[in-house]
Image (spheres, rainbow, N blue to C red):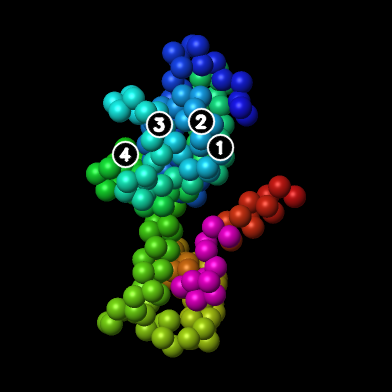
Amino acid sequence: MKHKLNWDKVNGLIPAVIQDSYTLQVLMLGYMNKEALQKTYETGKVTFYSRTKQRLWTKGEISGNSLEVISILADCDNDTLLVMAKPNGPACHLGTQSCFGEKNTSKLNILTKLETLILQRYQERPTNSYVTKLFNEGSHRVAQKVGEEGVEVALACLLGIKENTVKESADLIFHLLVLLRQCNIDLVEVLAELQDRTKQ
């Protein structure tokens, strides 16, 4: 076992808070016993102990909406776990991303939503979609749009027009997400690079 947990203090069941490792949104709360935690480590999928069914259950074993473990941390009293995970689908049985509602998110979550929408456009190519049009025009056009938006951000900033700078920055970020998808790069890869740079 990788943690010296105080199982006796909590009658053999440890509360486990599940958090999206990408958006930092709190997804759900479950309970683990020693066997559930061991199986979580062995499989890389979050497994709980169901107090209702009185057995182990791996998240997504029926729905397919599993939680891929990124890291597991114990709190200072060694009686609660924080599990950072990558969700494969909604975490809540009601079909929402989080059991705590859609307000449980930061403004940065819009990047995740945009990236998901752009991926759908890339795969499905619906007609009358601006994103589909960009993808169909190819990498050259998408790259051109990123360049144009970058210049417009710089000009708005130099002119000292805050409102225009905000709007042009939004355009730039949007088109950059389209470019990343065109290049088969996930935003999380860019964020990981930024994180690595802060460690230097």
Magenta stretch bounds: 178-189
Residue designated by label 2: 37
Q: Are marks 4 and 1 in contact (CB under 8 Å)?
A: no
Q: Earlier in the sequence, mark 2 or mark 3?
A: 2
Amino acid type of disc 1? Tyr
Which residue is nearer to you in this view: 163 or 49?
49
Mark 2 or mark 4, earlier in chain = 2
- The mark that comes first in sequence, 4 or 1, is 1
In three-dimensional space, the C-alpha distance between marks 2 and 4, rounded to whole angstroms, equals 21 Å
Query: What residue would you read off at disc 1?
Result: 41
Q: Is residue 197 magenta?
A: no
Q: CA distance from mark 3 to mark 1?
A: 14 Å
Q: Secondary structure at mark 1?
A: helix
Number of marks in the rendered image? 4
SS class, disc 3: strand
Visible residue check, residue 24: no
Which amino acid does the dot numbered 2 rest on?
Answer: Leu
Q: Picture coordinates of residue 199 (x, y %)?
A: 71, 47
Q: Which residue is mark 4?
A: 99
In percent of width and height, residue 101 lies at: 29, 41
Name the amino acid, label 3: Leu
176 vs 13, nearest the viewer = 13
Answer above or below: position of 137 versus 105: below
Residue pointed to by mark 3: 56
